[in-house]
Image (cartoon, coloured by chain):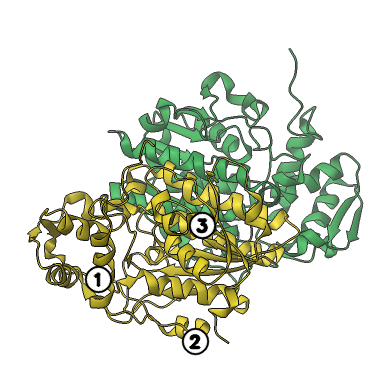
Chain colours: A yellow, B green
Amino acid sequence: MSSDRDWSGRWVTVLGGAGFIGSNLVIRLVELGARVTVVDGLIPGCGGHPENLAPVAPGIVFTAADLSAEPIPGPVTAADVVFDLLGDPAHGRSVVEPQRDLRHNLVAQVAVLEAIRRSSHRPFVVLASTRSVYGRPQRLPVGEDHPIAPPDPNAIHKYAAEQYAVLYQQMYGLQVVRLRLTNVYGPRQGNLDPAHGVTGYLLGRFLRGEPVLLFGGGTFCRDWLAVDDAVNALLAAGSRPQVAGHVINIGHSEPRSLLDFATLAREILGRGEIRSAPVPEEQRTIDIGDYWTNPQCAAERLGWVASTALRPGLTRALDFYLATPEGARWPPAPSHS
Amino acid sequence: MSSDRDWSGRWVTVLGGAGFIGSNLVIRLVELGARVTVVDGLIPGCGGHPENLAPVAPGIVFTAADLSAEPIPGPVTAADVVFDLLGDPAHGRSVVEPQRDLRHNLVAQVAVLEAIRRSSHRPFVVLASTRSVYGRPQRLPVGEDHPIAPPDPNAIHKYAAEQYAVLYQQMYGLQVVRLRLTNVYGPRQGNLDPAHGVTGYLLGRFLRGEPVLLFGGGTFCRDWLAVDDAVNALLAAGSRPQVAGHVINIGHSEPRSLLDFATLAREILGRGEIRSAPVPEEQRTIDIGDYWTNPQCAAERLGWVASTALRPGLTRALDFYLATPEGARWPPAPSHS
C-alpha cells in the first residue's frame, strides 16, 4: 500500500502548520490531495509564519488561534487525522521563561486532547515530541526505552504532553502515536533566531556573510534529519492507525558533528567563516553531549528510514534560502500591505 | 541530634499549610518553637481551611495567596525551610477538570521554584509529591526505582513538578528533596468530600450515620499512613539538607485492605454500616490495584519509619472528629461572623 495514495481527499488538520516542520508537512499534504486545515496561533517566537505557507495558501483553510487561550476550532475534532506540532520549540527560551513554555507546550496541548476526548468524532493523532525528553544520553544510539531525564522546562512539558496522550488513550480510547523527533533542518526553518534551531541559524549566518561561531568547536554529534525525511515519517505514522499507543524515535542513522554540518554547508555554499568559541557558562548546564537515534523501531513500526544524506539535505535547504528573495532572513518581516 | 530540637527559632514557610497534612505539620512546628508562615490560597476544593489552623492561629503568620495567579509572597524565599504542600490533592477531580489541576499543581509550582531560584536567599525545599506517580504497581513493595506511569492528570502534574525540582537543582543549585507520600489519614482530613481522600470520607460517613459503600468490597490494600507519621517524615526530611536531590517514598510497612480499615474504624466507633457496591465504570480505568511502599530508603536516608499502627491511628482520627462540635462535617462551613 502506497502511503502517498492514502491522503487524497482525506480531512487533515495540522496544528502548528505555519511553523517550520508543519508547513513542510502541509505543502506535501496539499500535493497529495488532502483537504488540509492549518491551525496556528502565529505566536511570536513559536516559529509559525504565513510566508511558510505561501505556496499553498489558496488550497488550505487557515485558522489563527492560540490554543492555550482560545477555544479549540472545530477542524481539530472533525479531521480524520490531526498532526499535532503545536507549541514553542525553543528549548533555550524555556529556561528563561518556563511559564511561557508551559502555556504553549502543555496548557494548549491539554486543551486539544480535552476537546478531542469530548468529541464524538475521534481523529487519529500524530503527536510530535522531542528527543530532548531523554536528556543527556546514557548510551548510544538512543532507543525508546532510554530513561527520561528532561534537561529543560520545554522537555518537561513535552513529556507531560506525551503522558497525557498515553493516559487519554487508556481512559478514553483516543488513538495517539508519539514521535520523538531529533534535530531537523531544511527549507523554511527560521534562520534568524538560534532559538529555532542551531541548524537554520548557522545556515542563515553563512548566507548573511556573518561568521559562524561553534561553541567548543562544534564537536558534539547529532543525527541531523532533513525535513523531507521528517515529513515522510509523519505521513507514515498518520497512515498507520495501528501504531496508536506507541512512541517512536525519528532520527537519522548517520550522526555527524556540528563542525561537519557547518563545514559541508560552507563547501556547498562556496563561502563562509567558521570560528570556535568557548562554551558559554549558561549553556554548560543544559548541554547534553552527543545524541543519535536507534532507527530500528521506526523502521519496524512505520516502514520508514531517513533516506536523505547530509549533502543533498543541506543543498536543498540552501537552494531554498538562495532562491527566495528574503531567504537570507527567514521568515521575512511581516509586510504592511 | 534530636530533629525535634532543630526547629526552635527557625524560619519555616508551609505552602498549603491550611490543608490536611499542612495544618498538622504547622501545629507541630509551632509546638517545636519554629517561626511559621503559612501560605495557602484557601481555594475551594484544594483542602485548605482556616479552621484547620485554629489551635495555632495567634502564633503564626498567615498569607492567603493563590500561587497560580498571584505574586509569590516574600516568606517563600526568606525562609530557612519551605515545606511545599501546595496544590489540589483530588485525583478524581483532575480527571474531570485537568486544566484546573494543571493550574494548581504545576503552574503554581513553577512560580514557586522560579521565585526561589531568582532569590539570593535559598531555602531548603521539602516537596510533597504522591505515590500515584507510579500508577498501578508492577511489583510490590514499590521502591523509588519503580517505573513512572501516572494514572491521572494530577499525577502527571505532580511528576512534572518533581522534574522541575530535579532540573532546578541541576541548573541553579536549588536544594530540594522530593517525598512521595502514600494515602494519609488522621485529624483534620476533610470528611465530607471523597475527593479529599477515601479515608476521611469513610470516617465521616460513619460519624454521620451514613452507610459506607466499599466498591468491589474494598479488597485492595494500601499502606495507610497516620498523619502524625507523615509529619514526622516531613520534619525528618526538613532537618537533613543532605537529602536534597533525592526522592523518597513515605509509607507504612503494613498494608491493610480498605475493608480492614473500615471494619476497624467501625469497631473503634462502636457503630456503622458497611456495604459492598460494584466498582463504577469511571473508576475502573483509574483503579491501580494494591499499593504499598518499600520503606527502606526512608529508613536509610531519613532515619524515619512509620510507627503508628492502624488501631491507634484510627482512634486518634476518630477522637479528633468526636471531640470537635463540627467534627462529623469537617471542615465546617465558613461562619458568617
User: Label 1 crowding class (10 Å Cα cut-off): few <14, some 14-19, many 20+?
Assistant: many
Residue located 25% across and 71% down the image: A314
User: Label 2 crowding class (10 Å Cα cut-off): few <14, some 14-19, many 20+?
Assistant: few
Query: Mark 2 belongs to which amino acid?
Result: Glu
Q: Secondary structure at mark 2?
A: helix
Q: Position of residue B262 (x, y in %)?
A: 81, 55
Residue lying at the far top of the rendered structure: B337
| Residue A249 vs residue A73, the one in the foreground | A73
Work out whether B337 lies above or below A239.
above
Q: Are marks 3 and 1 on the same chain?
A: yes
| Residue A185 vs residue B233, the one in the foreground | A185
Q: Decide if residue B230 is on the left or right side of residue B275.
A: left
Q: Quadrant of the C terminus of chain B?
A: top right
3 or 1: tag closer to the N-terminus: 3
Can residue A305 be seen here? The reply is yes
Query: Mark 3 belongs to which amino acid?
Result: Ala
Q: Quadrant of residue A246?
A: bottom right
Q: Are marks 3 and 2 in contact (CB under 8 Å)?
A: no
Residue assigned mark 2: A300
Residue assigned mark 3: A160
Inter-mark Cα distance, 3 to 2: 26 Å
Q: Position of residue A226 (x, y in %)?
A: 33, 71
